[in-house]
Image (cartoon, grey):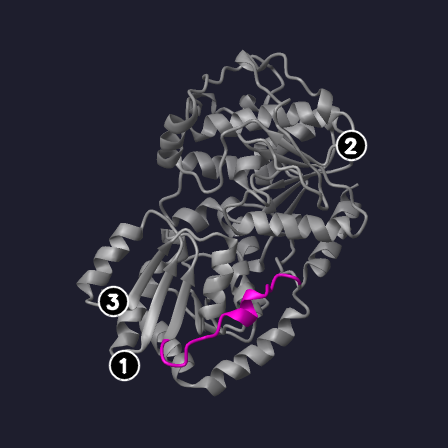
Amino acid sequence: MYGWEFPPSISGGLGIACHDLTLALSQRNIKINFVLPNLKKATHQKSHVDLISSSDVILQHRYQNISYEDFLQNIDLINVNSALRPYLNEETYIEFLREIQKLSLVTEESGESFFKLNINDLYGPDLLTEVARYAYVAGQIANNVDHDIIHAHDWLTILAGIEAKKASGKKLIYHVHALEIDRSGINVNPEIYRIEKHGLEQADVIIAVSFYTKNIIVKHYGIHPNKVEVVHNAVSKTKVSKIKNIIKKSPQEKIVLFLGRVTFQKGPDYFLEAAAKVLKKQKNIKFVIAGSGDMINRLIERAAELKIGRHVIFTGFLNREQVEEVFAASDVYVMSSVSEPFGISSLEAVLFDVPVILSKQSGVAEVLKHSLKVDFWDTNDLANKIHALVKYPALQNELLVQASEELKHIQWENSAQKVEEIYKASL
């Protein structure tokens, strides 16, 4: 299995999803070697996978003399020495490079490598170079680590999956958690789109996290629907911590929460515009925008323009404990995404007894029926629904009772069973 984040080093929902899915799979007696790009040595701790140091996976100049001695026995988690990080784009990647090291340019020497994809001219000291670098190492690992099937998560690792398939001849599953169309709308990065499309075409089976995502794969990438299986994400029954019982919600001041990357895809600007409309009707509300991203400064300026600055809190990036604290303190959770393949955070909100308002343009809306739903762009409707939940506790309670019942069936055990069935059908 190829991914790019995994606890304890995670940046978002994908790391949590990979952790919980692999845990559920391991409980079904499926042995998983999880390959990660990571500059740091792995934290050695016991879990359902063993975290192995990346120090022995070193790419020398022109990718020669790679050592795999420690990967030949009992490997559970392999950290490839790579600069890949989740949610990078070209600008943030270049900034990241300045902080760590100067990478050598990728050159094509192997007639069997992935570089035969007619995109040789794209590679330099940038994000795509790292995608290529990870792919090369992945193929070498596949030659040395015994496996029955290959499972790659999202675009940064699909080329690695393709190289592994070339090396071992095993079937490749491409697990799509998000697409460039989700992240960028009509302003897609053509290179990333091309990698995604190539991966979707080369995969033997595609897993989409929702029917919403499956429809995008079919419509925008030209993939036959029979090739795409839907396995919804889920939530772990053990996620709720003691914080839920320690932190009490304030009866005087309500908290409405936005949690996620503060980027175009997540729709924080629509959340803010709706907040201004709600505050015209009711003042005892704090709107919390929890997360970091490239829209922060613009939103701070907009809050000032709307004269609602004292009612809006920007927390910046939150660690896991802080996320739980803000969930426990909140009265309403809003997911205003422009395009959301799934949205695990909505399920977590329900675990913390927080009713949710979902964008209709989301995958989680397919399984969490007892939530209020809006079109992301309809700030009037969003404002009315926020106000209704804040004003009417009976509505809150009814949604929570029904949604909590739904969560009993939205479990990783069910998702893992579907993934295992896909594995068996692919062998």
Majority secondary structure in the magenta region: loop
Task: Identify the residue shown where x is 56% and y is 14%.
Answer: 60
Query: Which type of secondary structure does the marked residue at label 2 adopt?
Result: loop
For the residue pair 353 and 25, the one nearer the viewer reads as 353
| Residue 293 in the image, given as x and y percentages of width and height | 36, 48
Magenta-colored stretch includes residue 252: yes
Image depth: mark 3 or mark 1 in front? 3
Give the distance between the C-alpha atoms of the residues marked 3 and 2, in whole angstroms. 55 Å
Q: Residues within 10 Å of mark 3 (few under 14, many from 20)?
A: few
For the residue pair 32 and 186, the one nearer the viewer reads as 32
Q: Earlier in the sequence, mark 3 or mark 1?
A: 1
The amino acid on which the numbered mark 3 sits, given as a three-letter code, is: Arg
Q: Which mark is residue 281?
A: 1
Residue 87 figure quarter = top left
Give the distance between the C-alpha atoms of the residues marked 2 and 1, in whole angstroms. 61 Å
Q: In this rendering, does residue 128 appear at all?
A: yes
| Residue 416 in the image, given as x and y percentages of width and height | 72, 54
Q: Residue furthest right?
A: 29
Query: Which type of secondary structure does the marked residue at label 3 adopt?
Result: helix
The amino acid on which the numbered mark 2 sits, given as a three-letter code, is: Asn
Range of magenta residues: 238-253
| Residue 212 in the image, given as x and y percentages of width and height | 53, 58
Q: Which residue is mark 3?
A: 310
Q: Residues within 10 Å of mark 2 (few under 14, many from 20)?
A: few
